[in-house]
Image: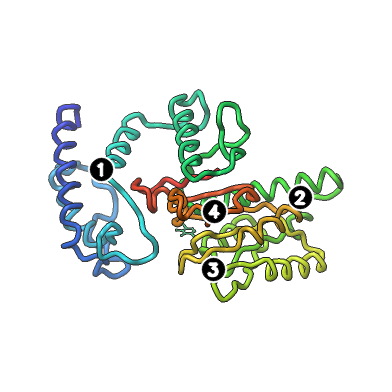
Amino acid sequence: MNASEFRRRGKEMVDYVANYLEGIESRLVYPDVEPGYLRPLIPSSAPEEPETYEDIIGDIERIIMPGVTHWNSPYFFAYFPTANSYPSMLADMLCGAISCIGFSWAASPACTELETVMLDWLGKMLRLPDAFLAGNAGMGGGVIQGSASEATLVALLAARTKVIRRLQAASPELTQAAIMEKLVAYASDQAHSSVERAGLIGGVRMKLIPSDSNFAMRASALREALERDKAAGLIPFFVVATLGTTNCCSFDSLLEVGPICNQEEMWLHIDAAYAGSAFICPEFRHLLDGVEFADSFNFNPHKWLLVNFDCSAMW
Ligand SMILES: *Cc1c(COP(=O)(O)O)cnc(C)c1O
């Protein structure tokens, strides 16, 4: 495809996308296919000869769309909300053109700096404490992760490293394996399944604290588990508090759980994946009170702020 064909096909694609979104409510929101539906419909290996562009595009309606769950359909009420918008899709196109890779400042200065400044904007909109912002020369600052699941895992791995270093500084003979064997993390029994999975990937125990009658993790239940585990020789090091649980939008009691985490030197990570966007509204900001006790905070603009997957903001 050369530049002149790209201009033509690009305009066709924009029309296809606009038609798709304008007509999305006439599509079956949940596909009527069985697992494995796709494989018989396409060749078993990559073709030796090219196919025409029209044939490939034709396959989208013939093969792909029948297997798509239309998350942005007005009839979609499953899992959790996900977002997109025309500006967000245009921006994705530009990112594709630049091939934006930002693993270091020099890898693309504008990429790194725009991310840092935008995450400060977002942080200020949420009224995060100053310590979370990069400012001009701050220690804080946010980064974009792919998903809230990834953010929880990153926080858990950081917390794990931090506690291992702290304990080894005090007792250099302790091996990493000896410490890891004793580490224990906590989350409420209402936490997202990715929290339990972060424990599995991170190779540490993850204990689910029974929530109260409002589906909230409270100080008393956390204390009880904590004391029992410490008495058994375990090392509590990490707590995930959820603000807006996926199942029912309950809120763990940050003002109760936060001080315990600080006293016990446990890393407190806040998972506010979908409800987080609401804290921008002054009338909902009180639900974030206690964030000052947290070591890390995450929410998903890709759920409620009109940007398409994947954009998970982590401070
Ligand atoms: C949606 C959700 C997640 C997972 O979000 P991903 O970005 O898809 O990983 C985690 N926690 C909560 C509370 C959620 O609502």
Disc 3 from disc 1: Cα separation: 34 Å
**Secondary structure at numbered mark 4:** helix
Examine the rendered structure and indicate whether residue 111 appears above or below residue 241.
above
Horizontal and vertical percent position of residue 75: 25, 65
| Type of amino acid under label 4 | Leu
Q: In this figure, which residue is indicated by the disc labeled 3?
A: 190
Question: Local crowd at mark 1 within 10 Å, few (<14), some, or many (≥20)?
Answer: some
Earlier residue among tags 2 and 3: 2
Residues under numbered marks 2 and 1 in contact, where contact means CB atoms less than 8 Å apart: no
Residues under numbered marks 4 and 1 in contact, where contact means CB atoms less than 8 Å apart: no
| Type of amino acid under label 2 | Gln
| Type of amino acid under label 1 | Tyr
**Secondary structure at numbered mark 3:** loop
Q: In this figure, which residue is indicated by the disc labeled 4?
A: 288
Disc 3 from disc 4: Cα separation: 18 Å
User: What residue is rendered at 58% in x and 70% in y?
Assistant: 189
| Type of amino acid under label 3 | Gln
Answer with left or right where residue 267 lies relative to residue 67: right
User: What residue is rendered at 76% in x and 59% in y?
Assistant: 235
Question: Local crowd at mark 3 within 10 Å, few (<14), some, or many (≥20)?
Answer: many
Of labels 4 and 1, the one closer to you: 4
Earlier residue among tags 3 and 4: 3
